[in-house]
Amino acid sequence: AESLSIYAAASLTNALNAVIAAFGETHPTRVIANYASSSTLARQIAQGAPADLYISANLQWMDYLTETGVLADDSRRTLLGNRLVLVTGTNSALVPVELDQDWNLAGALGDSRLALGDPDHVPAGRYAKEALQWLGLWPVAEPRLARANNVRGALALVERGEAPLGIVYGSDAASARVRVLAEFPARSHSPIDYPIAIVRSADRPAARELLAFLSTPQATDIFRRYGFEVR
Amino acid sequence: MLSEYEWQALMLSLKISSVAVLWSLPPGILLAWLLARGRFPGKALLDSLIHLPLVLPPVVIGYLLLIGMGRQGLIGGWLYESFGLSFSFSWRGAALASAVVAFPLLVRAIRLSLEAVDRRLEDAAHTLGAGRLRVFATITLPLTLPGILAGTVLAFARCLGEFGATITFVSNIPGETRTLPLAMFSFIETPGAETEAARLCVIAIVVALAALLFSEWLARLTRRRLEGTC
Amino acid sequence: MLSEYEWQALMLSLKISSVAVLWSLPPGILLAWLLARGRFPGKALLDSLIHLPLVLPPVVIGYLLLIGMGRQGLIGGWLYESFGLSFSFSWRGAALASAVVAFPLLVRAIRLSLEAVDRRLEDAAHTLGAGRLRVFATITLPLTLPGILAGTVLAFARCLGEFGATITFVSNIPGETRTLPLAMFSFIETPGAETEAARLCVIAIVVALAALLFSEWLARLTRRRLEGTC
Amino acid sequence: MLSICIGKRQGDLDLQLDIQLPLQGISAIFGRSGAGKTSLINMLSGLVRPDRGRIALGDEVLFDSRRNIHLRPEQRRIGYVFQDARLFPHYSVEGNLRYGSRKPDPQQFADVIELLGIGPLLQRAPATLSGGERQRVAIGRALLSQPRLLLMDEPLASLDLPRKRELMPYLERLAAEIRLPILYVSHSLDEVLRLADHLVLLDKGRAPLQGPLEEVWGSAQMRPWFAAEEVSSVLNARALSQEPKWQMTQLSLGEGLPLWVRSIEVPAGQQVRLRIRANDISIVRTRAQHSSIRNVLPACIEALQPDASGHQMAVQLRIGSHRLWAHITLWAASELGLSVGDQVFAQIKGISLNQTDWAAHGGRP
Amino acid sequence: MLSICIGKRQGDLDLQLDIQLPLQGISAIFGRSGAGKTSLINMLSGLVRPDRGRIALGDEVLFDSRRNIHLRPEQRRIGYVFQDARLFPHYSVEGNLRYGSRKPDPQQFADVIELLGIGPLLQRAPATLSGGERQRVAIGRALLSQPRLLLMDEPLASLDLPRKRELMPYLERLAAEIRLPILYVSHSLDEVLRLADHLVLLDKGRAPLQGPLEEVWGSAQMRPWFAAEEVSSVLNARALSQEPKWQMTQLSLGEGLPLWVRSIEVPAGQQVRLRIRANDISIVRTRAQHSSIRNVLPACIEALQPDASGHQMAVQLRIGSHRLWAHITLWAASELGLSVGDQVFAQIKGISLNQTDWAAHGGRP
Ligand SMILES: Nc1ncnc2c1ncn2[C@@H]1O[C@H](COP(=O)(O)OP(=O)(O)OP(=O)(O)O)[C@@H](O)[C@H]1O
Ligand SMILES: Nc1ncnc2c1ncn2[C@@H]1O[C@H](COP(=O)(O)OP(=O)(O)OP(=O)(O)O)[C@@H](O)[C@H]1O
Ligand code: MOO
Ligand SMILES: [Mg+2]
Ligand SMILES: [Mg+2]
C-alpha cells in the first residue's frame, strides 16, 4: 500500500493521531505522522525532507515554505483554529476573571510571573502579546513574563504552580492540572490559524485524498473534541 | 509489559546508540591518541573542534547537520552522489547526530586514560622488538581500557538521551528516527499524556542503568586482572 | 562589536556556567572519590543516579527539576520556606539546571583520574604521619589535577551549551536566564534570523575555545611540573 | 620490645610469625626473595592488616584482632623507606623531604641532607633523579619525619658502594645515638652483619630463627646462606690496650689469648664484636718464624668435617672459650695429620679483621 | 665492536663519551649513582636520542647525527633489563615472557624459566610478585626476545644472594656460549669482577677508564673504589694438571711456580683468570713447616707503600712475570725488616682462590 508522511506541529499530536486512525479504517493508505515544532519541520521540508503534507501552527513558517517554493500552492488552506485562554493551576485560589483593562494582573501574579510561549518566536506567545496589548496590560505584563520555548513549556510552569497564571491555547487547557479562568476575546488577537499544504514534490492523489479527509465531518468532529476550532 | 510503541522506540534507541558509539570508537581512540601524544600545529584547534558539540545547543548542532550533511548539504550531497549514502531522515542520520553530540565525551575520557599510561612500559615493549603498532595494540590500548570503557558508557548514555540534534536533523519519524527521547517529547507535547511520558522515562533509566552496571562490571574485571586477584 | 543583547547573553552565560561548575566541583570531587575508592552498598545505584542527567533529554530534566526544585516542589518548597532560597525564574535556577546536566561529565573525568592515582604514594604519605585529610589534600588531589581540569572544562563547555533543561525549568527571561543558547534558539525559531543566530553561535564557540585553550595551558603546566622540565 | 604475633594469608604465602624484637639498635629481617619480608613490614607500618594476631610497640598495642584494634599508619609514627622510593612526583626534592616533618628542625635537616649528599638536588623534581638519588631522598624523607621506629625495605639495594659505605655508619649512629630502633630488611649478608644487632630469618612465611646476631649467626639454619668462602664465626672480645706506634689495638679472647686488630677507638674493657672468616684461618703445627701473620693462637681441634665438595675440610677450633671454624684443603688436613683433640696453632691474618668485621656495641648491652 | 661516540646534555649532567666495546663477553659499565650509566644505555637502546655523535654495532650504524640516522628501539634488536622491572601489568608472567619471542623456542623457554626459578609463577599477575620475583621475570623476558646485544641495568640489585649466585654463571654462559654480548651496568665490584671481561668506568658523564678488565683493574683510577680489604690483583694463569684425589687443580704462574686451587674443569693449557686479594697473602722469610697453607711461592719485593691510615703496608710482589699486591701490618713489615729487592715467600691461602675468583675464558682470546 501507498504510504503518506504528514509533518505536523507537535501540539496536534493527540488530535491528528485520532484522525489518522479514522482515516486508516476506510483507506488502504498508510499514514505516518511526524510531530515536531513547526519551525523544525519547515526547515526540514525546505531541505528536502520526504514529507507529503505539512500542518503548521504558525503562519510565518508556512509563509516561509511558500516563498521557498516547495509547496503545491493551490493546496494551501487554513485547516484549524484555536482559542487563547488564561489558565491557573488546579491548586490555585484564583477565581475566573473578566478580562479587561481594569483586570489587576499585577495583583494576581504576586511576586511571580506570567507563563506564555516566547512572544519573540512562539506563535502562542505572539497571540498572547497581541491580546495583552489590546487589553492595555502589556506594559504591566512584559517585565514579568516567563517565556517558555513552546506552549507546553508554559503549561508545565502553570501546572507545577511555578507561575500562577499562563496564557495557552484552548486545546492545551484540556490538561487535568489546570483550570481555565478566562477566554480572550477573539478580536483581541489575530486569528489563530493552522494552515495545511501539500509538498509540491509529493503532490499525488493519495495526498489530495488525505487533505480532503481532514475536512470531512468525521475528522472535524475529532478535532473539535480535542479543543480545536475548525475553519 | 511494553507496548509495541514503546518497544519500537526502545529498540531504535538501542540500535542508534550502539551504532553511534561503535562507529565513534576508532576515530575517538585515534583522536584521543593524537591529542594525548601528538605534537603538531593546529592541535589546539583540533581539540576545540572536537569539543564544539558540547558547547553548542543540540538544536544548533542538528541545524548545522541539516545544512551540512542533509541530502542537499555540502558534504551530505557529495556523499549521496558519490556513494549513495544518505543520512537524511533515516536512523543513520540519528546515529550520526548522536555520535557527534557524544563524541567529545568519548574522546575526553579516552584521552585522560591515555595520558595516565606509563610510557616506560611502552619503552620496554619497544626494546622487546615491538613496533609502534604492536605496542599500541598490546600495551597502550589495554592499559587505556578503563578510559575506553568509561568513555563508551558516557557516550552511550549521552546517545540514549540525545534529543535536540536528532529531531532537528532527521525529525521524529516513527520506526525510523523516533527514539525514546523523541517519543517522550511527543507525549510531553500532548496534554494529559504524563503517564506515558513517565513510562518512557523509566524505560530509558532502566536501560541506562543496565548499561552502566555492565560497564562497571567490565571495569572491575579489568582492574582485577591488573591486580591479579583473579 | 557586540550588540547589547549579545553582550547581556554572553555575560549571563559566563556567570551561570562558572557558578554551576564551581558549585559542582566540591560535591563532584567527593562523589568521584566515593565511587573510585568507596565500597558501600548502593554504590552502583549512586553511580547510576549521577549518570541519569546524561540519559534523559534535557527537557525532561528541566521538567523533573520543576517538579522537585520548583517553589512548590518537594525540595524546592522546603528550601524556599526554610531559607528563602528560590530557584524559580532566576539565574540561580539556570545554574542549577546547567550543573545537573554537566555533573556526570565532571564526576566521570575526576573519577577516571582518581583511579589512576598511585595508591602507594598515599601509603607513603600515611607512613609520614599524614592523616586521611592531609593525604587527600596534598597527594590525591594534586595528582588528580589533570582529571579535575578535564572535568571542569568539559562541564563548563556543557554548561555553555545547555538549553533544554534551562528553558524548561526557569524559562527564557532576558537578563536573568536568557543565556547564549536560549538567545540562539529565539533566532533559529524565527524565519530569516539566521545571521543573528550565527553571530551568537560564533560567540559561543569563541568563548568555549578560550576556556579550552586556558585549560590546556593549565594542564601542560601541571604536566611539566610533574616531569620537572620547569 | 616490639612483639609481633600475626597470621596472614597472602596469595600463595601463608605468613605465621611470632617475633620479639628489642626496641634498640638495628634488627635485620633476612630472607630470600618472596619469603614475606615486605609483607611483614607492611603489617608493622599499618598499611596491611593482618588476618589475626597482635602487634605491640612497647606498651602500645598497634594491632589486636581480638580487641579489634588497628591503628592507622599515620597514628603509628613508624617511618618507612620503601623498596621503590615512592617520592611524590608533584613536590620538589625539598618538598618531599619536608613532607613528614612534624616540627621542622633546621639542624637535623642540614645534617640529613649533608650526610645523604642531596644538597644540590633540593630544587629538582623527583622524575629527573637517578635511581640512587631517588633512594637517598626517600631515606632522608623518612628520617625527617622523626619516627620512633624506622622500617627500611632494602634501602641500599640501589646505592653504589661508596654511598653505601657512607650511609651505613650513619644508620648505626642513628640506632646508637638517637636510640631510633630500625628494622632493616635485606638479603645482603654483608649489610646484615655490618648493621644488625638482632636477626630474624624469614623463610616461606615463617621465622625459624631469631635472636641476637652472635647467637643466630653460627646456627645450622644460617649455613645455606653462606657460600664456602663466607663461612665465618662471630665472637665477642674485650678491648685490652692500644699500640699507637703501629696503629693497632689489642683485644683479648681470654687469659693469654691476645688478638691484634687495626686500631679501633674503644675504651679498654669494652666489648667488641668480631667476625673471622673461616678462610682467613690457617693451621700450623709449629709457630712460624719471620711471618707477617700477627695473630697466632694456640687452639684445640674440636671437630673435623669434610665438606660435600670433597676438597675442603671444616675444622672447628676452640680458642679459650671461643669456638671458630677454619677451612683448609683436605690435602693439607691429611698432610698435617689432623685429628680431634690435637693442639695446633691458628694463624689469623690480623688485617682481615677490619672495619666491616667489627661493630662497637656503643653502650648497648 | 660496539663503538659509541656521543654527546648529550641531560639536566646537570653533560655526557661526553667515546667508548669502544668488544662484541663478545660481558662489558661492565661501572660508576657511582648519577654518573650517567642509565642515560648511556638508554641511548644505546634507542629510547633516548643523543644530541650528537655516532653509535655503531658492528657494521650497522644505529645512530649518526650527521647522517641523521636514528634507528628506533624495535629496529635495534637490543634487549634491555631495566633498573625497575617494567613488567606489563595486564599480562600474566607467561605473557610477559613470551611478549618479545620472535620465533618461540620451547627449549629456550624451558631453560630460562628453570634457571630463573620462575616456573611456579607463570600464571601469576605481575602485581602479586615480590621485588625479586619481578626482576627475575624481567630478565627472562629480555633473554627470550633473542637480542643480539643485551643491556642490563643493575639487574641483580633486588635479588637475594643465592639467586644472584644462581644467575651469574648463566649470564657468563650466555656470553660464552651463545656469544650474546652483554652490557652490564653495576655499582657492585663483586659483580663486575665476576662477570666482566671489559670494563668502562663512568664518572660524571665521562669515561676516564676503559679496557679489558685485567688491565683496568689495577689502575690508579680504580683505587678509590676499593676498600682496603678488597684490594686485589687479577692475573692470568695456565692450567697444568688435575689432582683427583684432593679435588685440586694445579695452575702455573710460570716456570716452577705452581699454584693449587680447588678443582676446576678446564683442559690443561687453558688460560684461567685469577683474583687474589691482597689480604689473603702473607709474607714469610722462610718456608714454614707443617702449615695448612698450600701455596707458598718465592717472590721478590718490588715496592713498599705504607697506606694513609698508618697501620698497613701494601707490598708489591713479583712472582715470575706477575705482579701482586699483598697487605700486611706495618708492625709486621718492620719486624720482618722488609725492603725493596728482598727475596721472600708469599703464602697464598689456596682455598680462597675459589669459584668467584676465577673465570674460565671459555674459548675467548
Ligand atoms: N597481593 C598479593 N597476592 C598474591 N600474592 C602476593 C601478594 N602480595 C605478595 N604476594 C606473595 O607473597 C610473597 C611474599 O612477598 P613479599 O613482597 O613480602 O616478599 P619479599 O620477601 O619482600 O621479597 P623480595 O625480597 O623479592 O622483595 C611472594 O611470593 C608474593 O608473590
Ligand atoms: N630528564 C632529566 N632531567 C634532568 N636531569 C636528568 C634527567 N635524567 C637524568 N638526569 C640526571 O642525569 C644524571 C645521570 O642519571 P642516570 O640515571 O644516568 O644515573 P645512573 O648512573 O644510572 O645512576 P644510578 O646508579 O643511581 O641509577 C643524574 O644526575 C640525573 O639527575
Ligand atoms: O507546535 Mo509549536 O509551533 O512549537 O507549539
Ligand atoms: Mg620485598
Ligand atoms: Mg641508573
Image (cartoon, coloured by chain):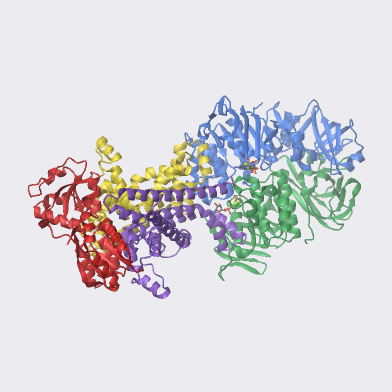
Chain colours: A red, B purple, C yellow, D blue, E green
Observer able to see residue E328: no
- Relative to B132, is D337 above or below? above
Give the farthest residue toward the top: D59
> Is D116 situated left or right of D294 in this image?
left
Expressed as whole percent of the image width and height from the top left, the position of residue E22 reads 70, 62
**Camera-side residue: E355 or C102?**
C102
> Is D340 situated left or right of D64 in this image?
right
- Relative to C42, is E54 above or below? below
Give the farthest residue toward the left: A102
Observer able to see residue E79: yes
**Camera-side residue: A32 or C93?**
A32
Expressed as whole percent of the image width and height from the top left, the position of residue E351 reads 82, 44
**Camera-side residue: B136 or E148?**
B136
Q: How many marks?
A: 0
Give the farthest residue toward the front: A26
Q: Quadrant of ligand 1?
A: top right
Q: Quadrant of residue D322?
A: top right
Q: Quadrant of residue D347?
A: top right
Q: Quadrant of residue B98?
A: bottom left
- Relative to B46, is C74 above or below? above
Which residue is rendered at x = 25% and y = 38% of the image?
C80
Expressed as whole percent of the image width and height from the top left, the position of residue E291 reads 88, 40
Expressed as whole percent of the image width and height from the top left, the position of residue A181 reads 15, 46
**Camera-side residue: A41 or C40?**
A41
> Is C160 situated left or right of E244 in this image?
left
